[in-house]
Image (spheres, rainbow, N blue to C red):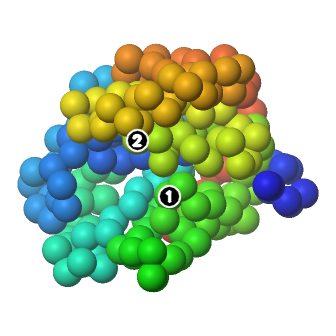
Amino acid sequence: MTSASERSGSPALFIDRDGTVIADAHYLADASRVQLLAGAAAAIAKANAAQVSVVVVTNQSGIARGLITHAQYAAVRDQTNALLSAGGASVLATYHCPHWGHPKEPCECRKPGLGMYREAAAAYQLDLMHSAYIGDRWRDVQPALTTGGIGILVPGIETPAADVEEARSALSARIFMAENLLEAVSIALAMIGARTPVQSPLGGQ
């Protein structure tokens, strides 16, 4: 569960990257191939306008597997941010887990673990209990069950059927499904309200 320090501060939208903000190209190493999904910039801009901070959280096991270098990951991250900026949107910070996630090599940061969320909460005084957790996989939504926040699954072409069924079985006052990111952000803003976001442009990368 969340600690007292994680229940103070501002709410945020924690949004997955691949398959939610950009097209999932599977271990994307070439920044020139970054493609924003339709409506992604508008959705994040809507959160910006409501003064709710957006934090991107992404599992990047390709780094541990040797399929992506840290430099390639950084270039893709920067290109994603540049495309969002061109669309009038911005994120407070981006956090990534570079680990494989093998059962014999567990880590605290790989989603649905809370490592990245807790790091962001500590860095920016974010309230995990009153935040929303959005993505195209159940692991992106699942942290809401631990923190007490709002979880919203946005099924895409890469979303496993099992993840959709998991979300459907958990639908409640805190777990939702949305057709696209813009709808998910609208639900999140209606549920968590709006407060003044953190202003620092720097964060975990």
The answer for how far apart the CA atoms under marks 1 and 2 are is 10 Å
Residue 56 x %, y %: 46, 50
Percent coordinates x, y for residue 168 in the rendering: 51, 23
- The residue that label 1 is drawn on is 111
Q: Is residue 171 left or right of residue 2?
A: left
Q: Residue at x 70, y 58 (%)?
A: 121
Q: Quadrant of residue 53?
A: top right
Residue pointed to by mark 2 = 137
* Residues tagged 1 and 2 counted as in contact (Cβ below 8 A): yes
Query: How many numbered circles does the render carry?
Result: 2
Left or right: residue 178 compared with residue 109: left
Circle 1 crowding by C-alpha within 10 Å: few under 14, some 14–19, many from 20: many
Q: Seen from this angle, which residue lies furthest right? A: 4
Q: Which quarter of the image is occupied by the C terminus? A: bottom left
**Residue 170 coordinates in the image, percent (x, y):** 60, 28
Q: Position of residue 16 (x, y in %)?
A: 42, 46
Quarter of the image for residue 189 reads: top right
Q: Amino acid at mark 2?
A: Arg
Residue 197 falls left or right of residue 31:
right
For the point 54% across and 55% down, the residue is 112
Q: Secondary structure at mark 2?
A: loop
The kind of residue on which mark 1 rests is: Lys
